[in-house]
Image (tube, grey):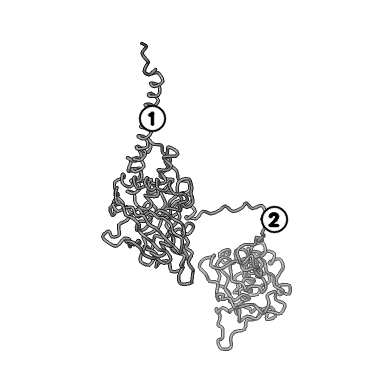
């Protein structure tokens, strides 16, 4: 019993000293380990360790004694005298010179003045603050405490359960390095040894490249019988037409100063790759070489079989005739009225003779028939003159399609006249915008040649080729269906022609055989 009591008193004395050194009361975690509840001791009411007493001294009242001033002294403030029960803050304590805690303690952190907390988890343990779990004081070596009770204390007291706010040790916090501040201590290493083994980057297709690739690869060849069936499948033709990219040109791609003054429509511009360049001068304000016209390929990939252009305007008539002379064109096909509800085209030819810039135009004759008018002209520049034929198809209704027969006849007449010329230049074709009716005529002409030469026709591939040269050719679904109807009609005529030729050939062969078998008139003998 006496040994147990002595051990408890030693525990109480050490607890009181620790409380005075740290400026707070002992937590509930240590008090809960004691068998009887006692009043917490304050810095100015601490009991030093006592010598073992006899059983008769157990119930004697305890005498309070102060901490040794050489070990630890409490300095109350001069302005406010501490009373029993008050708690000293860490800043009001003075530690001995040989104390393990330094005097220049960083007190910038706010510590509570008391450790009277309701839950054990409210105070961090000593290990969390970077301090040793079993601190020792230099004054313990000189104290009069019996070694045996101290040994009992080490066996019964568990400092891991003591939860306080100890004074932090200066320099205990490790300086954070750059990688630790970023949240990782993994070294950043760049391996450049495999850079030469990287596979080459794949080319990235832009929307423009995709459109051009589709126009170059779209094909649908049809023979004569398949063409007849396809011309009647209007819903399939409509879907086929809708899938053809229009390939219109953006104004930023053209990069021609002053071109807007020479365009009928802002959205219908010549493709830069195939546009016709005039020989005029170019300035920063205006490009005199500009005309809204493109060179169009015909059957057999001929580079300049046609020139598709817009209807001349008042300020572009001279440019139009300059282009006709420069490209040595012998045929002009006009598929528009001068006025359809509104002005569609200016009359760019004279009644007899007129001069347009450097070109003089003379009308020699006018012949009308078969739905179009033919004018024989002569164009002159200086001492040189050339013959020119002008076809004017004026029966195409506005926003509609004409009968296939008259337009097909116009196409065949133009082809026949072209074959009679020695070195004809490209055929100039225009409507109002230079893409709708113009596209129908050029596509019908190229497909008729393909049908005659190969016995099959690729309407889809031809239209895609036209749009590569000039955006928007064949402007509506109705025009696309009209093209199939005109080619189907031409295929029938070719079939009838072949049939008639075969019939005539058979008849002539039969007549020849009959003549061979016929001995002729015989002479009578007298």
Q: What is the count of numbered marks?
A: 2
**Where on the picture, by quarter, is residue 390?**
bottom left
Q: Quadrant of the N terminus?
A: bottom right
Q: Nearer the viewer, residue 122 or 153?
A: 122
Can you name the residue that lies furthest to the front here? 526
Query: Which badge, 2 or 1, is on the more N-terminal residue?
Result: 2
Can you name the residue that lies furthest to the bottom here? 79
Q: CA distance from mark 2 to mark 1?
A: 78 Å
Q: Residues within 10 Å of mark 2 (few under 14, many from 20)?
A: few
Can you name the residue that lies furthest to the right here? 141
Q: Secondary structure at mark 1?
A: helix
* Residue 83 falls left or right of residue 287: right
The dot on residue 79 is none
Q: Position of residue 238 (x, y in %)?
A: 34, 46
Work out whether 187 lies above or below 404: below
Q: Nearer the viewer, residue 116 or 372?
A: 372
* Residue 112 falls left or right of residue 378: right
Q: Secondary structure at mark 2?
A: loop
The dot on residue 193 is 2
Q: Nearer the viewer, residue 18 or 322?
A: 322
Work out whether 221 lies above or below 15: above
Q: Position of residue 105 (x, y in %)?
A: 65, 77
* Residue plotted at (66% across, 55% down): 195
Q: Nearer the viewer, mark 2 or mark 1?
A: 1
Q: Which residue matches tag 1?
A: 502
């Amino acid at each position: 019993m006496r040994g147990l009591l002595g051990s408890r008193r030693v525990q109480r004395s050490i607890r009181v000293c620790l409380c005075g050194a740290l400026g707070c009361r002992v937590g509930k975690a240590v008090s809960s380990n004691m068998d009887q509840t006692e009043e917490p001791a304050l810095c100015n009411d601490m009991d030093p360790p006592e010598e073992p007493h006899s059983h008769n001294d157990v119930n004697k009242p305890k005498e309070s004694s102060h901490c040794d001033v050489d070990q630890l002294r409490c300095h109350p403030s001069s302005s406010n005298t501490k009373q029993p029960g008050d708690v000293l803050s860490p800043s009001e304590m003075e530690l001995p010179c040989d104390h393990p805690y330094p005097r220049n303690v960083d007190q910038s952190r706010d510590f509570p003045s008391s450790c009277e907390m309701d839950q054990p988890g409210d105070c961090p343990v000593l290990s969390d603050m970077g301090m040793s779990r079993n601190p020792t004081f230099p004054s313990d070596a000189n104290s009069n405490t019996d070694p045996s009770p101290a040994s009992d204390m080490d066996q019964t007291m568990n400092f891991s359960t003591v939860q306080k706010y100890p004074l932090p040790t200066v320099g205990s916090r490790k300086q954070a390095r750059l990688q630790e501040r970023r949240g990782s201590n993994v070294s950043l290493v760049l391996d450049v040894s495999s850079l030469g083994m990287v596979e080459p980057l794949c080319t990235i297709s832009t929307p423009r490249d995709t459109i051009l690739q589709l126009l170059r690869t779209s094909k649908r060849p049809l023979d004569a019988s398949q063409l007849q069936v396809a011309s009647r499948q209007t819903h399939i033709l409509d879907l086929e037409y809708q899938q053809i990219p229009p390939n219109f040109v953006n104004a930023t791609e053209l990069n021609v100063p002053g071109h807007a003054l020479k365009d009928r429509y802002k959205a219908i511009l010549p493709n830069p790759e195939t546009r016709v360049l005039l020989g005029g001068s170019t300035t920063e304000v205006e490009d005199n070489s500009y005309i809204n016209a493109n060179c169009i390929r015909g059957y057999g990939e001929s580079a300049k079989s046609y020139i598709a252009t817009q209807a001349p305007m008042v300020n572009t008539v001279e440019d139009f005739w300059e282009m006709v002379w420069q490209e040595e064109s012998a045929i002009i096909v006009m598929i528009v009225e001068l006025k359809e509800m509104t002005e569609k085209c200016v009359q760019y030819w004279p009644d007899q003779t007129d001069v347009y810039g450097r070109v003089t135009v003379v009308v020699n004759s006018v012949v009308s028939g078969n739905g179009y008018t033919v004018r024989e002209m002569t164009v002159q520049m200086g001492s040189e003159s050339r013959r020119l034929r002008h076809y004017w198809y004026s029966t195409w209704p506005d926003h509609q399609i004409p009968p296939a027969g008259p337009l097909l006849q116009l196409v065949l007449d133009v082809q026949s006249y072209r074959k009679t010329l020695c070195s004809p230049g490209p055929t100039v074709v225009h409507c109002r915008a230079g893409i709708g009716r113009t596209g129908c005529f050029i596509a019908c002409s190229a497909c008729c040649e393909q049908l005659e030469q190969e016995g099959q026709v690729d309407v889809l591939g031809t239209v895609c080729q036209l749009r590569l040269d000039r955006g928007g050719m064949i402007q509506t679904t109705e025009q696309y269906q009209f093209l199939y109807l005109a080619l189907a009609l031409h295929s029938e005529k070719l079939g009838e022609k072949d049939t008639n030729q075969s019939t005539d050939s058979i008849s002539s062969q039969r007549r020849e055989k009959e003549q061979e078998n016929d001995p002729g008139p015989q002479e009578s003998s007298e």
